[in-house]
Amino acid sequence: MNKEYILGVFNDEESLIEAFGKVKEKGVMPVEVFTPYPIHEILEGMGNKTKITHAAFFYGLFATIGILGFLTFAASYSWPLNYGGKPFNAFPSFIIVTIVAAILSITLLTLFTFSARAKIFPGKKPKIFHERATDDKFVMVLDKESMGSENEAIQSIIKEFGEIE
Amino acid sequence: MYNSEVRGRLIEGDKSLGQISREIIAPIHAKTPIWWYGALLVSLGMFGFGLYCKYITVTTGIGTWGVNNSVAWGWAIINFVWWIGIGHAGTAFSIFLLILRQKWRTAINRAAEAMTVVAVFCASLFPLLHMGRPWLFFYIFPYPNTRGPLWVNFNSPLFWDFVAISAYLLISASFWYFGMVPDFATIRDTAKSKIKKAVYGFFAFGWTGSSREWLRFEGLSFVLGGIAAVLVVSVHSIVSTDFAVSVKPGWHTTIFPPYFVVGAIFSGFAMVLTLVITMRVLYKMNDFITDSHIDAVCRVLVFISLIMGTAYMTEIFMAWYSGSEYETYLFFHTRIFGEYAPQFWAMFIANAIVPQLFWFKKMRRNMWVVFIVSIIINIGMWFERFNIVVTSLSRDYLPSSWASYSPTWVEVGFFIGTLGMFIAGVLLFFRFIPMIAISELKSVAKFDKPHNHVKHTGHE
């Protein structure tokens, strides 16, 4: 894994977006882009998609069924108790707990999914290309090999908007 | 589309992105000021006194409190609802303003969320100790046990409340924490000391700011924001059912859930004001939390204050209009003109009348006025809970069971203990955590640039 990388370092969002667009026009895809805050053009342009919202929906669906099922089972089958003559299966009063506990399940499961998919977890050693990418620089990482013959053209694009490091 | 012009500038002083990081992180790298140690000592003293009162409560029993057979809920439940209400603002602030695309939230949401986590923690202590035998607390979990299995009563609002509060604590804490991960990474990458690099590096969970991370981070915020909005409304509605599901005069009303939710947001926003004005004074955050930020919160408060006033008047009107003599007696002979009139009027004046000062721009721009009014609202909201909890219990249907209530020093001490815990939590937050969401603030910084020629990127 001794690849050679070129770092395009930009001072602001606009320069990064323009350079990113031009680099892509040359048919080269940056390996990764590091920014201090999310920039939608880059997130879309990098071509990655996240299904975290779909996952959350299914977590919610299964959590709702599971919790409602459990409440019904516990209150009407496992050990029914008569609370002031109310029916054992007091469905309307189960709704509140179902909503809140489902929200809790969605949150926790989505967090774990995020942690697993984005690889953000305690004890992880970050691979830092540029120390100021979390501060005030916008960094585009390019693989030298993949650029091939476009190497010089791309270097000049980067120099037009930012610096090469 | 309207933009930041309506609100004034989001960040004063034309700062570069690097400056934003440096200035917000500065208190973490700076030497700890003497006043901080002093304040921490005082708050820990209060906390210690609270621990002593808890010790007395547990070893001797609830008999050390002023509660009796009729007024079985006293300061403990008042303070529980008060803290939960304050704890409401953090998530309400982040979520509702996020949904409404209010960019000015970025300077305040971190502090509001920190406040939420500490306040909910303070709140949860009260029902725990009120159980009398807190070591049997786990009985409330619906787990397969050797007593039957005897499940808990799923029809009881007290159980709903338990589920809601635990969920709220966990969710607001994780929402807060994951929002901080990119900022911890900024501290890791800018810190000079090795210890700081290691500690904040650990808490940053290996964040680098890559597009893959941001993409999923955005997805996560979207999901959490969407469902937490439901939670904010449901938690305090559930707290209100602790009262509304009973048949006591003054409690058994349909107005309670919205009344509680709005009241909670009211007290929480007031506490946010108290907190951010303190931040401005102690840490010179005026460039980030500008006068127009304070102004915006004040305008929200004046609106909510009107809703509170309307709710109070509605309750009184319905007591009279319903023709129920119990309701009429409670409102007119116990609350407005009776034994608890001072508490009723304290509530009414502090919540419905004093905040009307915020109609005047001059008042909204005077930090002393804003600070004092925010404290008055917090006191007023405490009296509101006193009114709800104590008056209804002390005058119910049977005159033979009427009773008065006043707290003992143990209950007061318990409350002082939670105040100490809250202040200590806030001080630790000031010292070790970036007080303002750095990455979010950077993302809105471009909207302040001269001439506003910046292309909108669709990201708020």
Image (cartoon, coloured by chain):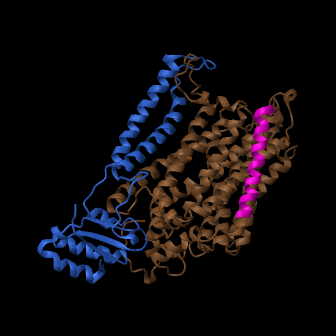
Q: Nearer the viewer, residue A120 or B260?
A: A120
Q: Residue at x 68, y 63 (%)?
A: B274
Q: Is residue B445 left or right of residue A145?
A: right
- The residue range painted magenta reads B37-62
Chain coloured blue here: A
Q: Residue at x 37, y 43 (%)?
A: A57
- Which x, y percent locates residue B122? 67, 47
Quadrant housing the N terminus of chain B: bottom left
Seen in the picture, residue A20 relative to B117 is either above or below; the reply is: below
Q: Nearer the viewer, residue B280 or B32?
A: B32
Chain coloured brown here: B
Q: Is residue B49 magenta?
A: yes
- Which x, y percent locates residue B121? 63, 46
Q: Is residue B433 left or right of residue B185?
A: right
Q: Nearer the viewer, residue B413 or B269?
A: B413
Q: Residue at x 61, y 65 (%)?
A: B297
Residue B115 shows in the view = yes
Residue at the extreme left: A149
